[in-house]
Amino acid sequence: MSHRKSAVCILLACILIAIFGAQAKDAKNNAPSEKIPSGAKMFIGPIKDGFDTFLKDAIGKKKVPVELVASRDQADYEITGTAETQKAGAAKKIILGNWHSREEASITVSNIKSGEVVWAYSVHEEASTHGKRSSAEACAKHLKEAMESK
């Protein structure tokens, strides 16, 4: 009986490895092929609750090597996204003593000519000390790292 259980476990492990290995290969093949060049002209579209303003400031602060332009017509790439803030409720403040907000943000960088999404990033901060600023700085930091690593 124990040989049968061992055989079933080995078979299940092989199946899982095959499934997850195929998914990883597909993800690698579907990775964006375009590198965002240093000095690229980027337009940041309006993002809910003024997150676009925080993102513009963060890109400057983190010294991301892009040129932000005021018009989509002047840009090579466009940043779009969503952002959501949930203020700490009374229970969180009283029970946990935590006044920090929960922040979520996702941005995508698309090539305007081809429409291809060349980079994307999401951030989730359960207890953000500086609110949207922290999320925007995380997005900018990872964009800079992605541009420098490719």
Image (tube, rainbow, N blue to C red):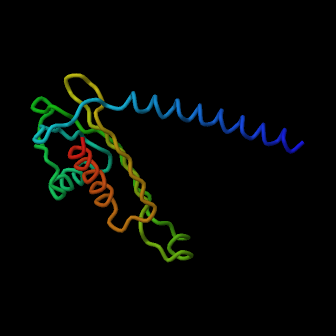
> Based on the displayed image, in which of its 4 quarters is residue 36 positioned?
top left
Rendered location of residue 73, percent (x, y):
12, 29
> Based on the displayed image, in which of its 4 quarters is residue 15 positioned?
top right
On the rendered structure, is 22 left or right of 139? right
Rendered location of residue 5, percent (x, y):
82, 42
Query: In this figure, what is the number of numbered marks?
Result: 0
At 53% across and 75% down in the image, what residue appears?
96
Rendered location of residue 91, percent (x, y):
56, 70
70 and 21: which is toward the camera: 21
11 and 38: which is toward the camera: 11
Furthest-right residue in view? 1
At 59% across and 31% down in the image, what residue appears?
18
Furthest-top residue in view? 114
7 over 87 or under it: above or below: above
66 and 87: which is toward the camera: 66
136 over 110 or under it: above or below: below
At 24% across and 45% down in the image, what residue appears?
149
Rendered location of residue 49, percent (x, y):
31, 50
On the rendered structure, is 22 left or right of 136? right
10 over 105 or under it: above or below: above
On the rendered structure, is 142 left or right of 69? right
